[in-house]
Amino acid sequence: MSARTARTRLLAAATVALAAIALTACRNGEGVRDEGPSSASTPDTSARSSGRAAPCSGAHIHTTARQVSRTVDHLLLTVTNTGATNCTLSGYPQVRFDGAPSSPRPVRETKPHTAITLSPGESAYAGVLLSAADGTGTRGHTAKTVTLTLPSGPAVRLTLPAQGVHVTEGPTVTYWLSSEEAALTR
């Protein structure tokens, strides 16, 4: 057995064990906390003057991340438009867990045909699979924070449950989608 195969199997086993622990850690109702934008943002007025929706930005959105109880190793990212006008969200979130060597890869099959337009109060969702979908991820770590960057910026740092979440090699993230169900089903 190659070192890579052994490492992959070890990471998969550790992921399953830590995911089970992480799920029980969220039962206190605390979930995650949005610490707000990590940098200031300037509203984009060019889109409003042209009649099209502006890109969703940190100044007019509320971002959350929560573990999902029905799936062992998923984190659900939610962006809600808190502004007074429509905004658009395209692509996938750039996600970076503290201590992680890289960001999750996007799941190409989840790419929508068009950008999502959020009316005031509406939300979009992205699902993060915390381990390799094929079980090949082996090494991992417990993350206490996650930084999420939208295509239009800025970065938002979210605090995860006190016990953290276990992230292995090979996590993936969906594109922004219009429903929780779509973001959690791959």
Image (cartoon, rainbow, N blue to C red):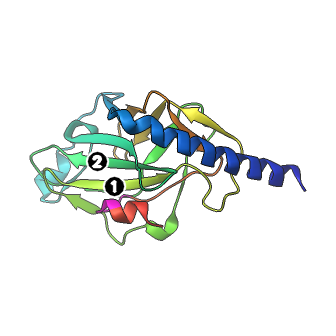
* Mark number, residue 79: 2
Query: Furthest residue to the left?
Result: 84
Query: What is the crowding at mark 1: few (fewer than 14 residues within 10 Å), some, or many (at least 20)?
Result: many
* Residue 81 x, y percent position in the rendering: 19, 47
Q: Please, what secondary structure does the residue beneath circle 1 have?
A: strand
- Asked if labels 2 and 1 touch by Cβ distance under 8 angstroms, the answer is yes
Query: Furthest residue to the right?
Result: 1
x 24%, y 34%: residue: 42
x 75%, y 51%: residue: 8
x 42%, y 56%: residue: 70
Residue 35 in the magenta stretch? The answer is no
Q: Which residue is mark 1?
A: 125
Using the rendered view, name the quadrant where residue 52 is placed.
bottom left
Left or right: 41 with respect to 14? left
Query: What is the crowding at mark 2: few (fewer than 14 residues within 10 Å), some, or many (at least 20)?
Result: many
**Which stretch appears magenta?**
176-180
x 79%, y 47%: residue: 7
Count of picture labels: 2
Q: Nearer the viewer, residue 168 or 120?
A: 168
Q: Please, what secondary structure does the residue beneath circle 2 have?
A: strand
* Residue 178 x, y percent position in the rendering: 29, 62
Q: Nearer the viewer, residue 168 or 172?
A: 168
Q: Amino acid at mark 2?
A: Val
Q: Amino acid at mark 1?
A: Tyr
Magenta part, dominant SS: loop
Residue 178 in the magenta stretch? The answer is yes
Which quadrant: the N terminus? bottom right
* Residue 138 x, y percent position in the rendering: 71, 47
Q: Is residue 28 above or below residue 57?
A: above
Left or right: 76 with respect to 17? left
Left or right: 141 with respect to 43? right
